[in-house]
Image (tube, rainbow, N blue to C red):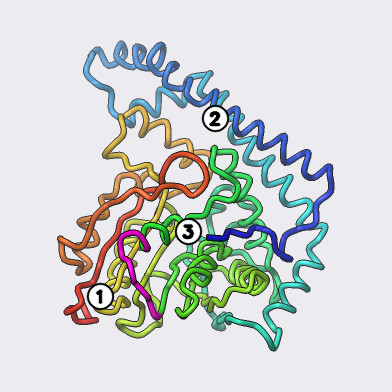
Amino acid sequence: MVHELKHSMLARQTADDLARQRFVLALKRELTGRIRPGNQLIFDARVKPALQSRLRSKAPVDREEIKRGLLADPSWQTWAALTRCSQEMMWATITEPLMRDRERIEAEAKRLRESPQKLGGLDLPAGFVPPAAMREHHIHLQPQGYAYTSSSDDVMAGALYEAGGNLYSMGQGMGGDDSKGFAAIRWIKANRPGFAPRRILDLGCSAGASSVPYAQEFPDAEVHAIDVGAAMLRYASARAESLGARVFFHQMDCSATTFPDGHFDLIVSHNLFHEASDETRNATFREIWRLLAPGGLNVNQDVAIQNATRTPFEQAERAYDVYYNDEPFWESYADADMVPELKAAGFPADTVREIQLGKINGPGHWYAVIAEKPAAASSRN
């Protein structure tokens, strides 16, 4: 497997740009790896006893009470403030070189999209309006948000997403060249030997980093990818062309696509559902059932923050992302049980299960839920 991060859509950076990014990376690693574990000590030594005293009970304290206790604790406030600052600093160090190189990046993107030799395609339907949540929230504090576009040539949402995502991941202890797409592909090839999908769909593709591996690893397949942001998709399309990958990008809502029934043999998503409401997630599961061909496979990879496996403290501490990182659906995703949701969407119980996807680079794993459409199933629910 080849995961190539270098391509012509990346910003040209100076030594000073890189030095600032290295500083932010070092700060993020310190906050995540060395300081954040101390939040448990703060809770055990100070927050929990104070809550139990106030509540006059030694019983376990629930998540909402713990949240209130942490939010009032000066040590936790300090960690949270520094973490928020590190995220804002990350975007500042990423945005400056992108804005400086914007004219070249957008010209290169247009050249790649309009080239007579282009491999894939881009469909941006007139009048499409991204969902309100994507317009109103700046998830991960990305400047202007995922769905923002300022002109018919704007690609900055995608450029920011890729550059910011790479730095953010390394700050969380993940390898800079880790690939969620390749992690899923490795699992598919190990568990479905000989599986040769004719058509593949990547839901919520963002800048296309997880879409490209499917085109590389299944060269005979027709790979499609959808997202709601026009600038995100312009960038994704140009990025794929720059890497020599044949991917067809579409501006669509993953919960209500315009593809025909039973059109895809493999449907995937990567870090989509922690950024979607319960209603959108369940509607998307129904859409996946409709779109899968009989014998088709669905793999939904995401972050491993399921509350069913975590203590009340761990659940409350992770609410940081709701309060300070503009992740409105973080907790509802963590509370969700997607196995029964996929069953309710139409998938037979014996085809749905949760798995762990080992990361390609670095320790740890991704969470994933998979579902299969029986070979004898109708393409309609």
Residue nearest the observer in this picture, 142 or 108: 108
Q: Assign a secondary structure to mark 1.
A: strand
Question: Residue at the location (64% across, 36% down)?
Answer: 86
Few, some or many C-alpha atoms within 10 Å of disc 1 (few <14, some 14-19, many ≥20)?
some
Does 66 sit above or below residue 300?
above
Where disc 2 sits, the SS reads: helix
Residue to which mark 1 is pinned: 295
Residue density around tag 3, few if under 14, some if 14–19, many if 20 or more, within 10 Å:
many
The answer to whether residue 191 is magenta is yes
Q: Position of residue 268 (x, y in %)?
A: 40, 65
User: Please, what is the three-letter code of the amino acid marked with disc 3?
Assistant: Phe
At 58% across and 81% down in the image, what residue appears?
120
Q: Looking at the image, is mark 2 or mark 3 earlier in the sequence?
A: 2
- Say which of 130 and 107 sits in front: 107
**Residue at image coords 76%, 58%:** 11
Range of residues picked out in magenta: 189-198
In the rendered image, residue 313, in percent from the top left (x then y), is placed at 35, 27
Q: Earlier in the sequence, mark 2 or mark 1?
A: 2
Question: In the figure, residue 200 lies in which quadrant?
Answer: bottom left
Question: Does the residue at mark 2 contact the one at mark 3 (Cβ under 8 Å)?
Answer: no
Q: Which residue is mark 2?
A: 80
Which of the marked residues, 1 or 3, is nearer the chain's N terminus? Answer: 3
Q: Secondary structure at mark 3?
A: helix
Residue 134 position in % (x across, y down): 51, 60
Estimate the x, y position of residue 242 in percent, counting from the top left: 68, 71
Q: Nearer the viewer, mark 2 or mark 1?
A: 1
197 lies above or below 99: below
Q: Quadrant of the C terminus?
A: bottom left
Name the kind of residue labelled 2 in the image: Ala
Residue position marked by numbered label 3 in the rendering: 182
Residue located at (45% from left, 69% from top): 202
Type of the residue with mark 1? Gly
